[in-house]
């Protein structure tokens, strides 16, 4: 049976044309999905010109065919500025005897004798964003998943923790069918769409209910930080349970430097309840990055008319109450994805879709907010 390790071994000899280094060793083979004799993956290229892409595609298909893969779905994307810097900076023989700075040691993680700082240490450089709501059913998890994917599409290294422990849904929303592996006692998160994911859903069989008290939930959440090998990350998004319960309190205590995004619908009551979650963040000295108004309107596909079926103005009023900005108004709808697609997921919007572009804009706003700090 085909496995990711089998596919990586088959592709390891393929070099990036400009850098002359293995795409597998560069970790430029991304989003790999293996189903029976079908393989779907993304290839990162230093330069995405048509001729280079054709040559790489031919070699990849030939090697996978030799490995027994009957159906291959390939996507190509150009390397981000960060990926270029890291790849060029790691070229063998180019160090010139110069010692790396402490910051480079932390970011790249290959200086002798110095261990990486824990992910929760503010010095690690990881930016934590908790996605919260006052009540359930406002699309908080959908927002979390798509914002994480949008950040990854912009070249950011992203982790996602499904901290909605009673109502975990992220694995299903992202179309994840595998579970984390263990490597020398450490849990290796599942990677999908360039996002590293951990969820209680990986450890609960047959969708059984979670009947735990607060302290047990807190211990599980701590394990997601302490026992998981996250590698190097720029952002960690946490999908919080709705409201202001035990898990939200634990997150605020464990990550005092985290920020928060509040999700609401336009309805006045939803916004009123969401204000409690925002107030909790402010009282515990957590910055509110902004408000996202989900299900803001329904747009007719035939005529383009917008119907505000859940009312209007709730997101703007909530943002004003919390002294923050309205990041986006997302229309009511569902991704135009088909189950037959190799990288099918029920809830992730395609990059070039209308809603996909909205999430891309939110990701850019988030990146710019941190760049100003």
Image: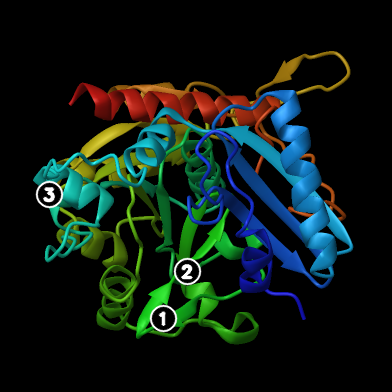
Per the rendering, the mark at residue 123 is 3
Q: Considering the numbered disc 1 on the image, is that residue within a helix, a strand or a loop? A: strand
Earlier in the chain: of badge 2 and badge 3, it is 3
Per the rendering, the mark at residue 153 is none
**Is residue 101 placed above or below 341 in the rendered structure?**
above
Q: Nearer the viewer, mark 1 or mark 3?
A: 1
In depth, the one of 373 and 9 nearer the eye is: 9
Residue found 11% across the figure and 45% down from its top: 99
Per the rendering, the mark at residue 183 is 1
Per the rendering, the mark at residue 199 is 2
* Spatial CA span between label 2 and label 3: 25 Å
Earlier in the chain: of badge 2 and badge 1, it is 1
Quadrant in the picture for the N terminus: bottom right
Quadrant of the rendered image containing residue 348: top right
Residue found 23% across the figure and 59% down from its top: 119
Residue found 47% across the figure and 69% down from its top: 199
Question: Does residue 204 appear left or right of residue 258 in this picture?
Answer: right
Question: Does residue 141 appear left or right of residue 128 in this picture?
Answer: right
Q: Considering the numbered disc 2 on the image, is that residue within a helix, a strand or a loop? A: strand
Report x, y in % for residue 340. Answer: 87, 55
């Amino acid at each position: 049976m085909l496995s990711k390790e089998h596919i990586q071994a088959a592709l390891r000899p393929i070099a990036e044309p400009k850098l002359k280094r293995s795409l597998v060793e560069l970790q430029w083979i991304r989003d790999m999905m293996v189903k029976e004799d079908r393989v779907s993956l993304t290839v990162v290229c230093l330069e995405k010109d048509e001729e280079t892409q054709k040559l790489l595609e031919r070699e990849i298909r030939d090697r996978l065919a030799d490995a027994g893969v009957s159906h291959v779905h390939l996507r190509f994307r150009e390397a981000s500025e960060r990926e270029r810097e890291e790849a060029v900076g790691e070229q063998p023989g180019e160090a010139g005897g110069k010692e790396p700075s402490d910051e480079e040691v932390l970011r790249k993680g290959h200086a002798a004798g110095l261990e990486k700082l824990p992910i929760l240490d503010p010095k690690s450089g990881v930016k934590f964003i908790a996605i919260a709501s006052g009540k359930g059913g406002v699309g908080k998890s959908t927002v979390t998943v798509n914002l994480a994917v949008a950040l990854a599409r912009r070249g950011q290294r992203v982790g996602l923790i499904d901290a909605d422990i009673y109502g975990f849904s992220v694995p299903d929303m992202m179309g994840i069918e595998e579970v984390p592996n263990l490597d020398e006692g450490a849990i290796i998160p599942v990677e999908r769409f360039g996002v590293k994911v951990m969820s209680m859903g990986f450890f609960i069989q047959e969708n059984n209910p979670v009947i735990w008290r607060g302290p047990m939930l807190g211990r599980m959440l701590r394990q997601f930080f302490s026992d998981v090998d996250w590698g190097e990350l720029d952002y960690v998004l946490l999908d919080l349970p709705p409201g202001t319960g035990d898990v939200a309190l634990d997150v605020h205590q464990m990550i005092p430097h985290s920020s928060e995004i509040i999700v609401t619908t336009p309805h006045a009551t939803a916004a009123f309840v969401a204000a409690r979650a925002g107030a909790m963040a402010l009282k515990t000295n957590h910055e509110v990055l902004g408000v996202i108004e989900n299900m803001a309107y329904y747009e007719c596909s035939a005529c383009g008319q917008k119907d505000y079926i859940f009312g209007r103005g709730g997101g703007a009023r909530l943002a004003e109450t919390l002294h923050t900005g309205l990041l986006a108004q997302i229309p009511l709808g569902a991704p135009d994805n088909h189950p037959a697609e190799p990288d099918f997921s029920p809830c992730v919007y395609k990059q070039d879709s209308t809603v996909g572009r909205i999430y891309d804009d939110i990701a850019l706003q988030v990146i710019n907010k941190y760049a100003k700090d």
